[in-house]
Image: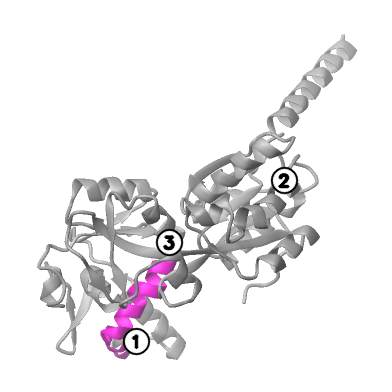
């Protein structure tokens, strides 16, 4: 009787294992909402042109995607994390503690962060200082740090419309938020000299601690309804903007380019955002786009290596490929990325 039970158990385990194996004949990708449309384009083309199933691609945010990738190794964990911001040391440490030892960092192009309003609304020409004065919790008025009570754009910049301030900022789960904080909010804080005032007021033990305090103060946004964090993807931001016609939304360039019938884009520092101005470095708010690959899965998940190579091929990610047609700024060092992918080179320490 015990032998029969053992045999039945063994058969059950074998059946479960077989089911799991069948269930993981597809590459699984998750993460950034900015990278999502690019990854979807590649996945669909991959399914049409290769003898592998179409990869499963999901959003959820850069940080959430990296966290999922770092849950461990095996068929119940994802293969790739899309990210519009670079992986952090905290992510790498979490990965290592869960057995994800080798990660391939793939930079496949660039995108810009743009500020857009309703297509029928007034034009905006922003500087980083304007956006800081609009959304910061505290601002510099007459050489003193005070709570932000600006209600209209024209109050601090007469060249801007006399329109109520409402900014739809990327939420803290967005990879976009990291770049937004560093390249827009912190930059604006410094332009208005608020950073210097925060630095002088800090009680930090040394210069590094004081700088950290000042940066944190700069990046603290107002919570009085003039700034609204959007934790969803850009479609949610667009829906909120459609409901509040005076809002300014923060989008990726490619999303804006595919919604020009609904959105009017603002200049930043006098520069119109475009693939050309981002490629040249003229537009000040751009960022590289990444995806991260679990190297341990490359010889286990059918089609994973082929998918990664296809993604960074000239046919897909090159300047004349479908990703560029959607809005991606091609990486001038794409050939080096292709060689790195072919060699399965794991990423080194963060700089």
Location of residue 251 (image quadrant):
bottom left
- Seen as rendered, the residue at the extreme front is 320
Q: Please report whichever mark, 2 or 3, sits nearer to the chain's N-terminal start.
A: 3
In magenta stretch: residue 291: no
Relative to 192, is 187 on the left or the right?
A: right
Whether residue 236 is visible here, answered yes or no, is yes
Q: Nearer the viewer, residue 69 or 319?
A: 319
The residue under the point 62% across, 41% down is: 45
Q: Which residue is mark 2?
A: 304
**Disc 2 to disc 1, C-alpha distance:** 51 Å
**Mark 3: secondary structure:** helix
Q: Where is residue 219? Give x, y as percent.
A: 34, 72
Q: Which residue is mark 1?
A: 203
Q: Please report whichever mark, 1 or 3, sits nearer to the chain's N-terminal start.
A: 3
**Disc 1 to disc 3, C-alpha distance:** 30 Å
The quadrant the C terminus occupies is bottom right
Location of residue 128 (image quadrant):
bottom left
Circle 2: is it few (<14), some (14-19), or many (20+) Cα within 10 Å? many
Q: Where is residue 279? Give x, y as percent.
A: 50, 71
Q: Which residue is mark 3?
A: 176
Q: Mark 2 and 1 residues: CB-CB less than 8 Å, in contact?
A: no
Q: Nearer the viewer, residue 126 or 318?
A: 318
Placement of 239 over or under 285, stated as above or below: above
Q: Where is residue 300? Give x, y as percent.
A: 78, 42
Placement of 302 over or under 283, stated as above or below: above
């Amino acid at each position: 009787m015990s032998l029969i039970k053992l045999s039945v158990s063994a058969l059950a385990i074998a059946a479960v294992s077989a089911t799991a194996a069948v269930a993981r004949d597809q590459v699984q990708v998750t993460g950034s909402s900015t990278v999502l449309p690019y990854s979807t384009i590649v996945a669909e083309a991959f399914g049409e042109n290769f003898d592998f199933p179409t990869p499963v691609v999901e959003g959820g945010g850069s940080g959430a995607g990296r966290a999922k990738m770092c849950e461990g190794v095996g068929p119940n964990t994802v293969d790739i994390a899309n990210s519009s911001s670079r992986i952090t040391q905290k992510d790498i440490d979490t990965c290592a503690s869960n057995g994800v030892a080798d990660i391939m960092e793939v930079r496949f192009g660039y995108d810009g962060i743009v500020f857009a309003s309703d297509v029928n609304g007034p034009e905006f020409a922003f500087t980083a200082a304007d956006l800081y004065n609009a959304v910061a919790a505290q601002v510099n008025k007459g050489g003193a740090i005070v709570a932000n009570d600006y209600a209209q754009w024209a109050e601090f910049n007469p060249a801007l419309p006399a329109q109520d301030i409402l900014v739809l900022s990327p939420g803290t789960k967005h990879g976009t938020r990291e770049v937004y904080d560093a390249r827009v909010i912190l930059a604006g804080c410094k332009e208005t000299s608020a950073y210097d005032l925060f630095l002088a007021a800090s009680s930090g033990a040394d210069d590094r601690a004081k700088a950290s305090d000042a940066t944190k103060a700069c990046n603290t946004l107002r919570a009085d309804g003039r700034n609204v964090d959007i934790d969803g993807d850009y479609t949610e931001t667009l829906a909120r903007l459609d409901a509040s016609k005076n809002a300014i939304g923060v989008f990726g360039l490619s999303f804006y380019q595919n919604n020009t019938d609904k959105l009017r884009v603002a200049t930043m520092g006098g520069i119109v955002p475009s693939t050309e101005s981002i490629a040249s470095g003229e537009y000040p708010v751009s960022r590289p786009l990444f995806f991260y690959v679990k190297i341990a899965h490359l010889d286990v998940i059918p089609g994973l290596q082929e998918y990664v190579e296809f993604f960074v091929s000239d046919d897909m990610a090159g300047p004349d490929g479908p990703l560029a047609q959607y809005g991606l700024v091609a990486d001038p060092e794409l050939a080096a990325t292709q060689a790195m992918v072919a060699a399965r080179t794991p990423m080194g320490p963060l700089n």
